[in-house]
Amino acid sequence: MATARVFVLFVVLSTTLAEEFKLKFKPSTKPVRLFTEEELKRYDGSEEGQPLYMAVKGVVFDVTKGKEFYGKGAAYNALVGKDSTRAVAKMSLDPEDLTSDTKGLTEQQLQSLESVFEGTYKTKYPIVGYTASRILTDDGSPNEAFKPEDQPHFQIKDEF
Ligand code: HEM
């Protein structure tokens, strides 16, 4: 019995550590994937077996492990398959806020966006790419100022 418990603990710990390792040491050589609006829409949870992706500030996160929030029929399903920056900033699920547009947001909403972006999305979910509008300029040429985001370096002990 005790051996079984130790084995389960070992499996749980190695899975958690492997996940953390992947977030910390994601190879910088991995190509950045660019998502058009149509491509991102495929990951909105309506297709069985597809991962769940959503973008915040043009950064596309794989939020599949937050299925209980974002999956089909879940409370925040409206946020996935698109860039939901405005909705996250305003903590709103109003259809008109399901957009990357940050025009007219208050200082407080922008601060809240920053804190959820850093503290929830970048900390919890792997980055899988960027939206076309983050990587390209209006005329479709590459945005020279584009820089990939780093995943924050956090320790497993910070979780407890
Ligand atoms: C009555 C209103 C609401 C309640 C009671 C509520 C409650 C919660 C709770 C308890 C969590 C944390 C869950 C956990 O970490 O286990 C959470 C997370 C979250 N909520 Fe809400 N919420 C509400 C409305 C909203 C709205 C309107 C939005 C719109 C964007 C929103 C967006 C989020 C997001 C993005 C997270 C983070 C999910 C993640 O970790 O991936 N919430 N909410």
Image (cartoon, helix red, strand yellow):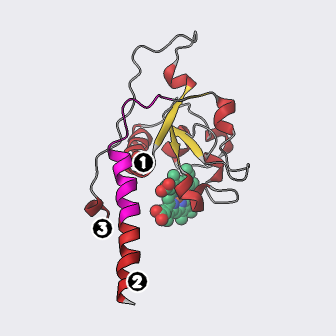
Q: Secondary structure at mark 1?
A: helix
Q: CA distance from mark 3 to mark 2?
A: 24 Å
User: Residue type at mark 1?
Assistant: Val
Task: Choose the circle earlier in sequence order: 3 or 1.
Answer: 1
Which mark identifies residue 160?
A: 3
Q: Is mark 2 within 8 Å of ligand 1?
A: no
Quarter of the image with the N terminus in it: bottom left
Q: CA distance from mark 2 to mark 1?
A: 38 Å
Q: Secondary structure at mark 3?
A: loop
User: Residue type at mark 3?
Assistant: Phe
User: Residue type at mark 2?
Assistant: Ala
Q: Is mark 1 within 8 Å of ligand 1?
A: yes
User: Which residue is found at the position 68% from the left and 43% from the top?
Assistant: 95
Residue 140: quadrant of the picture: top right
Q: Secondary structure at mark 2?
A: helix
Q: Position of residue 2 (x, y in %)?
A: 35, 88
Q: Is residue 151 left or right of residue 113?
A: left
The label nearer to you, 2 versus 1, is 2
Q: Position of residue 36 (x, y in %)?
A: 63, 27
The residue where tag 2 is placed is 4
Residues at discs 3 and 2 in contact (Cβ within 8 Å): no
Q: Residue furthest toward the right?
A: 47
Nearer-the-camera pick, 116 or 66? 66
**In the image, is residue 123 above or below residue 99?**
below
Range shown magenta = 14-32
Residues at discs 3 and 1 in contact (Cβ within 8 Å): no
Which mark identifies residue 116?
A: 1
Residues at discs 2 and 1 in contact (Cβ within 8 Å): no
